Amino acid sequence: MSKPGRFLSRWSRLKLAPVAETGAEAEQQVPAATVPPTAAAAVEGGSPAGVDQVAEPAALPDIASLALDSDFTAFLKDEVSEGLRRQALKKLFNDPHFNVMDGLDIYIDDYSVSTPIPPELLAKLRS
């Protein structure tokens, strides 16, 4: 029978071997399909890769003309810049439709203002 130290070292080596092989293979083989075409074009075109180049879609309506019944889905696409998306959502949620408090909300009341106890109840409590 072999010594326990040799068995454990052999077991550990065999266990870690497939992980090391797959990691080395993944680093060597990067398929060209995983690189986004815009990033490849930016590198080939000579423009800096770290610059955000988000094109604003021309079909978007003016934010000032938006109303509650307008279609806001165009502003939620990935091609739209974060600032423009936030402006559109701000316009949407500034509508009075979204400024209605829920009547079932138990925290809606102002509990800091107490109503005075009627004198009849005070007399009853004292006796």
Image (cartoon, helix red, strand yellow):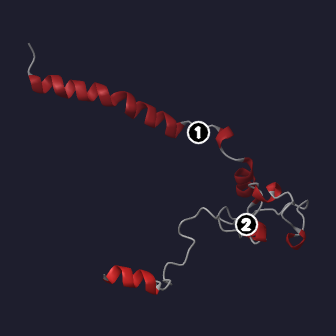
Farthest top residue in view = 1
Residue named by callout 1: 30
Q: Amino acid at mark 1?
A: Val
Q: Is residue 2 above or below residue 73?
A: above
Q: Which numbered disc, 2 or 1, marks the residue closer to the eye?
A: 2
- Which residue is rendered at x = 44% and y = 36% of the image? 23
Image location of residue 76, percent across then percent down: 75, 57
Q: Is residue 61 above or below residue 12?
A: below
Q: Are marks 2 and 1 in contact (CB under 8 Å)?
A: no
Image location of residue 70, percent across then percent down: 87, 60
- Which residue is rendered at x = 8% and y = 21% of the image? 3
Image quadrant in which you'd find residue 101: bottom right
Q: Is residue 115 above or below residue 93?
A: below
Between 53 and 103, the residue placed more toward the observer is 103
Q: For this view, does 20 lie left or right of residue 29?
A: left
Image quadrant in which you'd find residue 91: bottom right
Residue named by callout 2: 98
The crowding category of the residue bearing disc 2, from other C-alpha atoms within 10 Å (few below 14, some 14 to 19, many at least 20), is: few
Image quadrant in which you'd find residue 100: bottom right
**Figure quadrant of the N terminus:** top left
Image location of residue 115, percent across then percent down: 50, 83
- Which residue is rendered at x = 38% and y = 27% of the image? 18
Provide the secondary structure element on which disc 2 rests. Answer: helix
Between 8 and 104, the residue placed more toward the observer is 104
The crowding category of the residue bearing disc 1, from other C-alpha atoms within 10 Å (few below 14, some 14 to 19, many at least 20), is: few
- Which residue is rendered at x = 80% and y = 54% of the image? 73
Q: For this view, does 106 lie left or right of residue 87?
A: left
Image location of residue 40, percent across then percent down: 71, 51
Provide the secondary structure element on which disc 1 rests. Answer: loop
